[in-house]
Structures are given as structure tokens and as C-alpha cells.
Amino acid sequence: MTRTLLALLVAAAAGCTAHEREGLQAVSRPDVSRMAPSAQTQVRTSYETLTRKIEKRSTTAMELANAYGEFGKLLMAADEREAAKPCLVNAQTLAPGDVRWPYYLGHLHRKNGDLANAVTSFERALQLKPEDVATLVWLGNLHLDEGQPAQAKLNFERALSLQPRSRSALFGLGRVALAEQQYARAIEHLEAVLRQDPQAAAVHYPLAMAYRATGDTKQAAIHLRLREDRQVLPADPLIVELEALLESPQTYESRGIQALDNKDWPGAAALFRHGLELAPDHAALRHRLGTALYMMGDVAGAQDQFERVVRTSPGYHLAQYSLAVLFQTQGRHAEAIEHLSAALEIKPNYTDARLRFANGLRHVGRAADALPQYDQVLVETPDNSEARFNRAIAFVQLHRYRDARRALSDAMKRYPDQPFFAHGLARLLASAPDDTVRDGGRALALVQTLLGKEQRTLDLGETFAMALAASGRFDEAASVQRDLLKGAANSSLHAVVARLAHNLDRYERREPCLTPWTDGELP
Amino acid sequence: MTGRSAFAVSAVVLIAGCNSQRSKPDVESTRHPVAGSTSSQADWFVDRAAETGLDFVHFNGASGQFFYPEILPPGVALFDYDNDGDLDVYVVQGQMLGAGTSLADALLPPTGRSLPLTGRLFRNDLRVREDGTRVLHFTDVTAQSGIEARQYGLGVATGDIDNDGCVDLLLTNFGTNQLFHNNCDGTFTDISKQSGIEDNPGVAVAAAFLDYDRDGWLDLYVGYNVNYTLENDTRCPNVAGVRDYCPPRTYGGQPDRLYHNVGHGKFADVSAAALAGATFGPALGVVTADFNGDGWIDIYVANDGVENLLWINQHNGTFKETALLSGAAVNELGKPEASMGVDAGDFDNDGDEDLFFTNLTGEGHDLLVNDGTGQFQDVSAQSRIGPASLPYTGFGTAWFDFDNDGLLDVLTVNGKVALEGRANGRFPYDQRKQLFRNLGDGRFEDVTGKAGRVFALSEVGRGAAFGDIDNDGDTDVVVANDSGPVRLLINNLGNRNHWLGLRLVGERRDSLGATVAVMRPTGPTLWRRARADGSYASANDPRVLIGLGRSTEKPTLRVRWPDGRIEEWADVTIDRYTTLREGGGKKRR
């Protein structure tokens, strides 16, 4: 039966039964042919259920409302909003006392950007369930979108009176105050949200703007750094139900990604596994399952999933990359290089892979091969500070100390707020075997500046000692080195102890260190 | 009313001297109170593309494989390539994409109006009759122009790169960009290689010419979009498994490029030194203006789905990126938006450049008010543009005073990039355009319903170029649609008010970035800027057209040239175009 014919049938059936079914809108099943097979089946089944209910004269209005509503929900979950709308409208017409239908319609209109109808639907839902905090918050948000902060305020205040710890309502009040240019009040509300939930990263940006408006640019800058693209939403069981409705690999993938974002690793893994039951060869799902397992600490499980993707979908560059990352963390650089090379063959402009590839080459003693890779990374991402640093290290490995010095000096100017360039340069100047590069005085000046600003790490202490030695201040160098040695020994850092002892021996012999980084230290 | 229009017409002819001797078909007068009114002429804007010979249909090569570039084009340019005083049109064209595909695979096969598949140059053969009516006609001169644009075209930018008085043409492509030098004889030469702008292949959409270092030569900013190749094309099904175009995050951004014009149209890539310290995103829109009021031109970049960039000129050949703290990077919730088309303009007539950019369905377009120091506040919701634009995905846009009442209005050209709940149709991404009238109190009225029948057309709008195509004293618009016909929106309303048309000329070329303060004995001072950039993938009329409302007073004009020099002209005649040349006014500090 063609879709048009079915639509006519549905419309006709709706129009010729009991009086409560009059005024219903024509409903049709959208073209499902391009959907995932599992979703096609679901939509067809739900549509057949609806059709049967319509055709059956004994179907009550409530039963018919549910059938329309469930079909509408399913279509909405499948992002078939145009087709979902008449279904939900019919459900609302047939069951005017059921809060679900105006609530879902409110969300549908909201997603379509139809503010006026969204507000009307949520207000209708609110009449049916006046104490529903989610509806109040959504209404408040819509009023803010409309540029009606005073209206929004009423909704948020009502929500807070019902649920005093509602973060979304409090956040809404902060936004209202910001829109009304009441910056002190905005700060008060938004800080309150952060006190309740320090992880509510969405608060930081509006808070930064409020601080900026009060002239407190320092606080503004702090909050801008903490900003994340997340939302503060109310608990919304009806939407949770809707999002879990559609059986498709993509739905499970999307829900799994949400779980990953929420750092719910086991939840994410379970959702990806469900998706894989529907589509066992879905490379992205299996790759994400591997990621979730890795985050859970199941490295072997993760490796198994990544390897399966590489076997079944060798062109899936992300799996090649992830497998390489995993091998690199295990020090299996040769295997990592193989997979990074494969990833780059598939996607030549995959910058992250190229950077790791270059690092891997360095680690297996192929620094000369790494250099053009770093250069390519810097063509693609000129501000890639990691590539600039590692490129300098490659020069060191190749004993091209002047090139290393130039690279680090340039980077230091380019990134004045990234101290590892200054530290790297200090280390090089303090211990380069090339006498024309080694410059104890300059190294010492750099380290002293860093000591005044940065945390006093063992690395920095070691560089300090190197710089003192390079300046001919061997006794002081030895003294600093002994302190470091004691600290390393107390922390059972055996490899470090051996290195420190070796250099201490040099300082006591009044010789500078001539090894900027040992092989084990190389980043 | 009639008398004023007739005066305007004769003034234009005097200034532009543009009565071409070319033979032209006698197409009916474009508009005007003096011409017989028809019902369509009661519309504020009327589409006259097809009847005037601007007969072009874009072809995007879509074959059901959802290659990312298909959803981006086309851009369009308005520029006077032959210096005859009227605006000509260049439209970019697409190609089939993917190995082994042919035109037979196209979902929407090219028609005669699309062929040949090359970017097209249309010469404007505007003729003004003695009674003031206009005969507007376009002639396709691509073949004789020397412009060979057979890559997958995305956008276009215009500027005179060698100060020879003829406007040159930059084409941004999915491929390598092309720079065409205008030979000042109606032909162009491809100088991409020798000019130094040819880069590795990429996806470049937006570009802008600007003189950022005040050396008198136009430099070039090219905004690159995603890190996409046909080889790394990815499938992006929606939640139900229905395939659709991928969002830009699938591919990630590609770094933008700043080219310094070292003289005579030779460029050097100075991106590494000049644009340090920012993370580039998928750029779609670029606009240049002095945002912090220090007299130096800055750059604003609209990035798709990641933070926008505000490059503040440091006066030493470098820029500092300040968008986040300036309040110009993300929306009021701290969320990066899609940010396609963009423009800067002084909508509140307070002397600084405010920002407007178009976004995805559900995001609403953004209006950011400048406090004069380059600090912005998001007033999208209060302005009413935010809520009214929520159902639309916007692309081409500009601040322009369509009714010449002295307040900058906004038009947006819309068209989706994702199915958004409607999966039927071969290319179901169409939406209507929108027009917002500035009410002068910070709010805008959605006047789309009054603007004319062309606003009821649902098309996949992308590029939009703004300019006075019929030289009648109001701003017209050329709209370029993805897989659709070009529209020529002739303004039937604007010149019912008084106006002032200016061409701001430096040594020999349009002085892009020059600003003019229009000071009148009564009424607020109006600030406007000469520019060709902004909008989406498109180039605008570089002349400045200022609406004066009912005022007949002759204003005093204060021009700040891009090199910092300030000059004044008094008692400038209105309702006509006047050319102001740098050095010809009274010097001011």
C-alpha cells in the first residue's frame, strides 16, 4: 500500500468514527526506507498499531490518543518532527487531560525554533501539572529566548519554591539577572549554582560576563578558563524516556556519547554494546566501546575492541589511532608507528596522528624522520605548541643544538605563558655539549625567573643545578643536587636517583652536565 | 516623490557617466515611481533576475553521497569590473564530486541555465532613460573575460590588489583558491601562482581584503573551513540512521591565512607571525572593521560550531585574538554557535561597529552590541531578532538600510544544512529569507511578510551580495541559492526617502575600511563604512549608501581613511552619488 493511500485511509478513518475523533489531523508514515533496519521495523509496527486502532470502531478515545501519542513520540525520537507533530496534536485533542502530549509538543516546537507554539504547549502542560519543575524551567528558558526576562523570572522563582535546590532554576535566575543587567545579583545566583555543583561548567561563561560587567576582569578570566560547552538542564523523565525509545545503532551511540561526556564509563559501555547487538559491524560503536573500556581501566578489553575494528574496518582511522595510543602508553612504539602510519594513509591531514607518529619516530631513534612530520603538523596547525617543543627535542637528539636553541627561543616568545619552553631552553643552555650553545648565565637567569613563578618540581631543581654547574658554581650545584637526591630517594624514584647521582658525581668533579635529557627522560 | 527620483537619476548619470553605447535588449524598466506601477512593484523587493538576463542556476553536484562541500555554496559578488559605474555580478558554480561520478549521477541535474559548469561573470548593461526609468540587463561575459573557474567554487571576494583602479577577483574553492587580475580591458588573468596566494588544496569559503598595516596595499585574509578531502569523507547518519551532511566537527577546522600584500599584488603568507596564539575553527564568515575604536582595522571571523575569533590589530603587523573576553566568541550561555554569515555595522548610531551573525535552526541569529572599546554584549533576545530567527539557518546577511530611514536593518538568506525532521525531497534544505526593520530603540520588527513575494520563496539560500544595482539610491540584493536560481532583489522602497551615496577613493581604488561620519544640523550623526566583505562567501558594493529619512539638509562628512588620516567635506549634495578622494577634503585631527 502506498504511503499516500495509507495517509488517506488514516485520515478517513479518523474522520468517520465517534464524535470525539473529529478534527483530527491527517497522519502519515514518513519514508522509512533510509532508516536503520531496526528503526524501520519499529516505525512500521507502531504505525500498524495506530492504523488498527483507528480502524477498530470500539477503540476508545484514550486508547486512540495513546496510539497517536506513542507513534508521535517514536517519530520525534527518530527526528521526524514534521511527521510527529500531527500525531501529538491528535493525541492532545483526544486526551486533553494527559500532560505528556502538550509537553512533548512543547519540546517539538522548541526544537523547530517555534517559540510561540512552544510556550503555548508548555503553558498547557503546566495547567495540567502546575508543580512540574521541568516544565517551569523550560518555560523560563523559552521566555529568556523571547527576550522576556521578567516572565522568565516568575517561572524560575516558582520552580525554586517547589524545589529549592533546583540548579536549573537557580541558573535561570542568574541568566535573568544578567539579561536585566543586574550583575551583582547574577553573580550571586550563578555562584550559588557553583557552590551546589562545582562541576556545573555551564555556569562559568555567564558568570565571567557578569564579572566583566562589574569590572572584575581577573575573576572573569578565571571563569572563562573553566568554561565548558555544557547545559544546566532540569531532571526530565519524559525526555529521558523519549530518547531511549528508538532502537537504532545511532541512538545507542548518541546516548553512549552522552554517558561518556558524563564520565559514566560503564553506562556508556553498556549502551555501545546494545548498539553493537543491532549492528555488529558498526566501526564507530565498537571503537567507542573500546574507549569506554579503556576509561574503565580495562586495557585488554579496549585493545581487543580496537583490534577488531582494525580487522573488520581497516579504513577506520580512529581505531588505528586509538590502538597506536594504547601501544604508545605501553612503550610499544614500533607497533604504534605502524598503526599511526595506517591512520595517516587513510587521513593524511589527521594532525593528532601525525604528531604522535613524529613522537614515535623519535622514540625509536628516527629523529631525522620525525622532523618533516613536525613541520607538516605546524603547517596544518601553526599554533601547536606540543609539536614545536617536540621538534626542538628532535634537534637535540640529532645533536643540532643551535637549531634546538633557536626553536625553543622562538617558541618562548610565541608562547610567553607556557613555561615549558623557557624550562626546555634553560635545560639546553645549561647542559648542551656544544660549547657555543651552552650558556650557564642565561640558563641561570631563566631558571631563576621560573623558580619565582612556577612550582618547584624535581625537574626544575635538576635544571637549576645544571645551570649552576654550567656557570662554574659547582659547590652550589652539588648542594642542590644532594637535596634533590634525598627527595627522590625518599620517594623511591630509583631511576631518577641513579641519574641524579651520576650528575652529582660530575659536579663534585667540577664538571658541568653535558646531557640535557637522558633517553629515559625524553618526552 | 517623482521629482526627487528623477533628480536622483540624472545625478547618477552625471557622476557615473555610465550610459554605455553597447547594444541592449529592451527589457522593461526595473522599478520606480515614475514607471507604471504594477502589483509586483508594490512589493518592497521584487525578483528580476531571469527577466534581466541574470539567468543562472547553481549546480552542487549532489549525488546522494553527501559530500561535505555540497552544502556550502554558492557565493556571489557585486563589483564594477569594467568601471562603467554600475555593479556587475559574479556567481560561483559547482561540479560533480567523487571519483567515477558523472552528471548522470546528479540528484538535481544541471539545466541549460547551469551550463557550462564554471563560475560566471555577468556584465551589468544598465541604461537610464531620459524619464529616469531604468533598463536593467545583464550579459554573460564569462567566455570573453578570461575567467576560468572550473574548480568546485564556494565563495568570492573582491579588491584592487595592485592599485591600478580595476577591481580584482579572488575565488575560494574546494580545491585551491584562484586570484584573477583585472586587466582593465574587460578581461582577467589568473595570477594565483605568481601572486603567492596559492596554497595547498583546502575548503576555503570566506575571504576579505583589508589594508591592515596602512601601507596602501590591500592585504588578504582567507577563512578556511574544515579539514576535508573526498578521501576522508565520513558517513553521518542521524539518530534513525538516515544519512545526512556531517557537522563541521566531524572534520575539524583548518587554519586561516593572512597574506600581506608586499606591493603590486604580490602576497606573502604572514599567518604564523601575525595570527599567533589562537585556535582556528571552521571559518565561514569574515568581516573587517575597527572594533575597538583605535583607528586600525581588526578582523572578526565567524567559525562554524566553535568559538569565533576577534583579531585586534596591534599596529605592528600582528593581531591579538580577544574574542572570548570581549564577549564575541560564543553565545550568552557560553556555547559556540554555527556562525555562518556575518556583518559589522553601527545599528544603534553610537559610533561603533556592532556585530551580527547568522546561526543554525534553534540557535537564533546573534546581535552583539559594541560598547565602543571592542567589548560586546549579546542582545539577540532583546532585539527580537534572536527569537524570530530561531526557526531558520542563516547564511548571507548584511546591515543595510533598506528603507533609507537612517537606521541599519538586516536581511538574512536562509537554508538548512541538516534534514531537521524533514527527510523527504531530493535536497530538502530550503527555507525562506527574512527581513528585519530597525525600530531605532534596540528592537527589530520582522517585516518579512511585507517585503514582497520573493520572500515567500523557500530556497536553499547561501550567498548574498548587497549594493545599489540600478543606481537609484537604495540597496538591492543578489541572492545565490544552493542548487537553485540566482535571485535579484530590486528594492522598490528605499529611495522614497532621501539618501546620500558615496564612493570613498584612496589613491586609485575604493578605500575599503574607510569610515564616514555623516553630520547634520539636526538628527543624529550616522557612521558608516566602505566595505566589500561580510555576508557569506560574497562581496558587496564598496560604495556607501546612507539613508537620510525625510531630512533634506546637506550634511558635513568626516572621513577617517584606513591610513588614519581624517578629512572633512561640508555641504555635500544629497540624493546622488559623490566621489570623495583622499587628500581632497579639509584635514582634521
Image (cartoon, coloured by chain):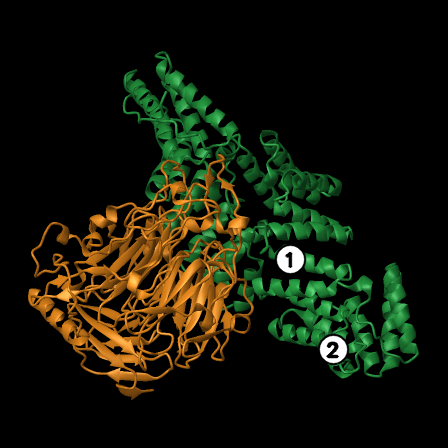
Chain colours: A green, B orange
Point 54% across, 61% down: residue: A224
Amino acid type of the residue that numbered disc 1 sits on in the rendered structure = Arg
Counting other residues with Cα less than 10 Å from the Cα at mark 2, is it few (<14), some (14-19), or many (20 or more)?
some
Q: What subunit carries mark 2?
A: A
Residue B268, image x and y in percent?
49, 74
Front-lying residue, A36 or B135: B135
Looking at the image, is mark 1 or mark 2 earlier in the sequence?
A: 1
* Res B207 seen here: yes
* Res B399 seen here: no
CA–CA distance in space, label 1 to label 2? 35 Å
Instruction: Determine the image quadrant of residue B102.
Output: top left
Residue B357, image x and y in percent?
38, 58
Q: Secondary structure at mark 2?
A: helix
Q: What subunit carries mark 1?
A: A
Q: Quadrant of the C terminus of chain B?
A: bottom left
User: In the figure, B111 relative to B510: above or below?
Assistant: above
- Give the residue number, with chain letter if any, for mark 2: A448
